[in-house]
Image (tube, grey):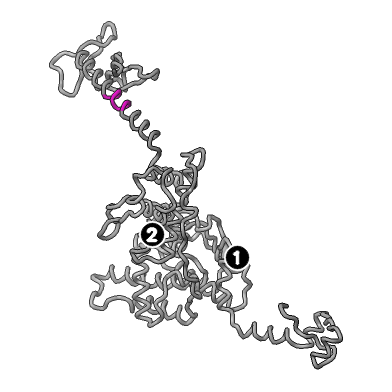
């Protein structure tokens, strides 16, 4: 038999000279307060006490009788909600936490505790998102493979076989092995969060033994030559990427387009000659440029439309080549939006550029300049590859590009001419080089020497 609802005490409170009724009651040893509404009261000028206001009671006000009736209803609603919450919690304890709850808790932790970048939060939320959610841009809705398959399952009961079946379903949609492995990685991260004693204390991570897809080794990085970079910049500068059938309407629009074209051209040059990511370019401010010291300070980037830290989370200082410095110097002469806190690359109102619109203009300029259709990000690869090709050491390149691991930077070494290495190899195989290094040969035994056909000449030993 359910316990009777507690009785509420109705009290008069005052806020900024206006009285209101409040209900106070205790539930399971806890005091609860709930505001009822404005009290139809006025102050007695003689005693200063509250008394019933004269006139008819308005619908949006409360006298003592109406306040008590409302208080009883508030108590009943609170007790009902508390009982329902207790029942839900009891069911959760009985059946165990669902993967949907695990996913939500993981995403909250990723944002609040880990402070993940907006782009990371967006990607993980997409993988763990519910099916049928409309896209923010364009038509269509999310498929929600993970939640559709695992959302309502008790997380502790999910098996490795279920994970493998889910990954097979995702793979069957035609996505790349790398994408399937990304799904696997995000699901594993959610379970790793859930097995901690401080969260849900799940017994194991079923993703640990799920199969990974074999990914194709990345191709050699592609990059532009300096001539191609300049061809792209000239195409943008001269507006050759614009549709001639859609001329500017009015002088102001024509001036705005011309300024945008010049800015796009200089942005391409800075991307290729300073190695900045697109998000770093969009967040670059004039105070970040040390012209006297020939350097850029890269401390911020735009991630999923939000300004945050760089990809590595660290501030880096990039040596400023003359080609990039000249482009920034030309930008500083535009006449407006050149204060210390202004964006270097901005729209006609000084606000941040639309990254997707920038990429569209970049693709049209590629066609106009008749250059290879590489990605905007490949301008950054151009920076690293041209440095490697010119003989700059890999550690210097790593620092300039802000890579966390040297293995990432080593991918650019493919651009270094093989002819230089071939010359070094050739020199290493000469007798002079061998003797100059102070190396000594070991004479083989006599029987070996006799079989070799030349006494004292080392004979290759199997397995050496």
Residue 402: give x, y in percent of width and height: 55, 62
280 magenta-colored: no
Nearer to me, 431 or 201: 201
The residue positioned 49% from the left and 66% from the top of the image is: 276
Mark 1 falls on what kind of element?
Answer: helix
Magenta span dominant secondary structure: helix
Q: Which residues are magenta?
A: 77-83
Whether residue 326 is visible to the viewer of this picture, yes or no, is no
- The nearer-to-camera label among 2 and 1 is 1
Residue 25: give x, y in percent of width and height: 33, 17
The residue positioned 35% from the left and 19% from the top of the image is: 27
- The residue sitting at the bottom extreme is 453
**Residue holding disc 2:** 352
The residue positioned 81% from the left and 83% from the top of the image is: 436
Calculate the distance from the C-alpha at mark 2 to the C-alpha at mark 1: 32 Å
Above or below 99: residue 13: above
The part of the image, by quadrant, that contains residue 74 is top left
């Amino acid at each position: 038999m359910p316990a009777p609802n507690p009785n509420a005490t109705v009290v008069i409170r005052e806020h900024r000279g206006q009285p209101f009724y409040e209900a106070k009651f205790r539930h399971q040893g806890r005091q609860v307060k709930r505001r009822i509404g404005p009290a139809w009261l006025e102050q007695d000028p003689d005693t200063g006490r509250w008394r019933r206001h004269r006139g008819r009671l308005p619908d949006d006000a409360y006298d003592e009788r109406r306040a008590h009736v409302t208080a009883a209803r508030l108590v009943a609603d609170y007790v009902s909600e508390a009982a329902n919450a207790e029942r839900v919690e009891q069911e959760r304890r009985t059946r165990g936490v669902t993967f949907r709850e695990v996913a939500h808790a993981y995403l909250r932790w990723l944002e609040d505790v880990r402070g993940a970048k907006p782009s990371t939060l967006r990607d993980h939320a997409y993988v763990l998102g519910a099916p049928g959610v409309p896209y923010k841009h364009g038509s269509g809705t999310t498929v929600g493979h993970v939640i559709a398959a695992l959302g309502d399952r008790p997380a502790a009961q999910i098996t490795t076989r279920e994970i493998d079946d889910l990954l097979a379903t995702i793979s069957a949609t035609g996505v790349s092995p790398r994408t399937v492995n990304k799904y696997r990685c995000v699901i594993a991260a959610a379970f790793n969060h859930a097995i901690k004693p401080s969260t849900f204390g799940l017994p194991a991570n079923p993703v640990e033994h799920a199969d990974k897809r074999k990914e194709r080794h990345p191709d050699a990085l592609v990059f532009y030559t300096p001539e191609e970079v300049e061809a792209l910049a000239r195409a943008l500068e001269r507006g050759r990427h614009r549709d001639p059938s859609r001329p500017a309407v009015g002088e102001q629009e024509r001036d705005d387009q011309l300024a945008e074209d010049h800015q796009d051209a200089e942005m391409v040059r800075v991307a290729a000659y300073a190695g900045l990511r697109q998000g770093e370019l969009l967040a670059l401010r004039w105070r970040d440029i040390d012209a006297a010291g020939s350097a850029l300070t890269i401390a911020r980037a735009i991630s999923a439309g939000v300004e945050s830290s760089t990809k590595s989370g660290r501030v880096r200082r990039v040596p400023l080549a003359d080609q990039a410095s000249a482009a920034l110097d030309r930008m500083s002469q535009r006449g407006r939006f050149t204060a210390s806190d202004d964006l270097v690359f901005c729209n006609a109102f000084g606000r941040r550029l639309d990254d997707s619109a920038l990429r569209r203009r970049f693709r049209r300029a590629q066609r106009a300049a008749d250059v290879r259709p590489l990605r905007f990000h490949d301008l950054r690869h151009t920076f690293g590859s041209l440095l490697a090709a010119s003989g700059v050491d890999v550690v210097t390149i790593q620092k300039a590009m802000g890579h966390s691991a040297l293995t990432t930077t080593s991918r650019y070494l493919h651009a270094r001419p093989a002819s230089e290495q071939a010359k070094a190899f050739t020199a290493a195989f000469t007798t002079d080089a061998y003797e100059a290094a102070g190396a000594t040969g070991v004479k083989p035994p006599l029987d070996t020497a006799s079989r070799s056909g030349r006494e004292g000449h080392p004979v290759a030993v199997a397995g050496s």
